[in-house]
Image (cartoon, rainbow, N blue to C red):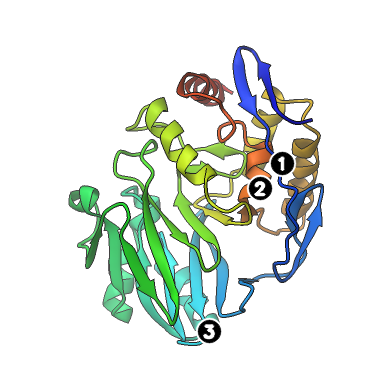
Amino acid sequence: MSGSFSIRRIRFTNPICHRPCYRHGFAHVYGLCISAASQPWYTNTMTLALHPVPMRTDNYAWLVSDTESDLRAIIDPCEEQPALEALRQSGGHLALILLTHHHDDHIAAAAALRERTGALIAGAAADADRLPRLDHALHEGDRLPFGTLAEFQVINTPGHTRGHISYFMPQGPFLFCGDTLFSLGCGRLFEGTPEDMFKSLRKIATLPADTLIACGHEYTSANARFALHVDPDNAVLQRRTADVTRMRASGQPSLPVTLAQELATNPFLRASNPHALGELRQMKDRF
């Protein structure tokens, strides 16, 4: 199935990736890039590694390792001990703590980790009054160097909160999007509008199709149930749901996921206008 279709007056687009994927450890299945390797995930050059760090009930912080410089960055740490254990196992020196938004389950351990490791904290300048003291106050378009050749590029992604930002690392490519985009879902609109979220998701949709989406929560199974409710005939979504069920049953994370997969299966990312996205969000809130 391809093109556009409507469900309950909600219009979707359905682009599916047909590009070959040569990423280390990935297979090309159903036109999508499916992980065939154990953690961590590596870039083509093998100089960057991406590690999910489970925290609290369903949170993920993300540890990025530059294997040439031995520098590390962590995104949205809410517990100190899991972060320190991940650092111990990976080795290296924590240089950056990146925050996507002000909610406690994304920032609670940031100050303690800075005190213990000397790492610098980065976050949105617009949200500085709700974040731990920032060493890097960031705006859209800012570039934060990391390691030997990599950088984090700042993208404003309001909707879940008004000051939410995401970090794109083109050398991965990786996207750290906090609670803006989830696999098969998106964040609740606590402070933003459907228009805000729609614009944020459109920005994400323009990134390379093989970008690995590293979001802040393990919500994929619940999101899959809703996605199938509104899009029951999507064969790619059906296969993705089966894959997620197998991964979670074996204790594996469902993340990261490629943008190509999300473009083919995520009803929020595929909504054709802000009104449709708003209707979907209201339906999901009641689901």
User: Mark 1 — residue?
Assistant: 16
**Residue carrying label 2:** 260
Look at discs 3 and 1 and give the one toward the viewer.
1
Query: Residue 30, how many percent across, how many down?
Result: 82, 47
Q: Is residue 81 above or below residue 161?
A: below
Q: Secondary structure at mark 1?
A: loop
Using the image, tell me which numbered label, if any, was put on residue 73.
none
Mark 2 or mark 1: name the one nearer the start of the chain: 1
Question: Mark 3 against mark 2, which lies toward the viewer?
Answer: 2
Tell me the residue at 42%/80% (across/down): 147
* Residue type highlighted by circle 3: Thr
User: Looking at the rendering, which quadrant does residue 21 occupy?
Assistant: bottom right
The amino acid on which the numbered mark 2 sits, given as a three-letter code, is Ala
Location of residue 264 by image quarter: top right
Residue at x 41% of width, y 59% of height: 76
| Image quadrant occupied by the N terminus | top right
Reply above or below: 204 against 279.
Answer: below
Q: Residue at x 50, y 87 (%)?
A: 68
CB atoms at circles 2 and 1 under 8 Å apart?
yes
Query: Amino acid type of disc 1?
Result: Ile
Residue 281 can be seen, yes or no: yes
Task: Identify the mark nearer the N-term, 3 or 1.
Answer: 1
Point out residue 246 in the picture as x, y percentages from the top left corner: 79, 51
Disc 3 or 2, which lies upstream in sequence?
Answer: 3
Q: Which residue is mark 3?
A: 67
In the rendered image, residue 129, in percent from the top left (x then y), is placed at: 17, 50
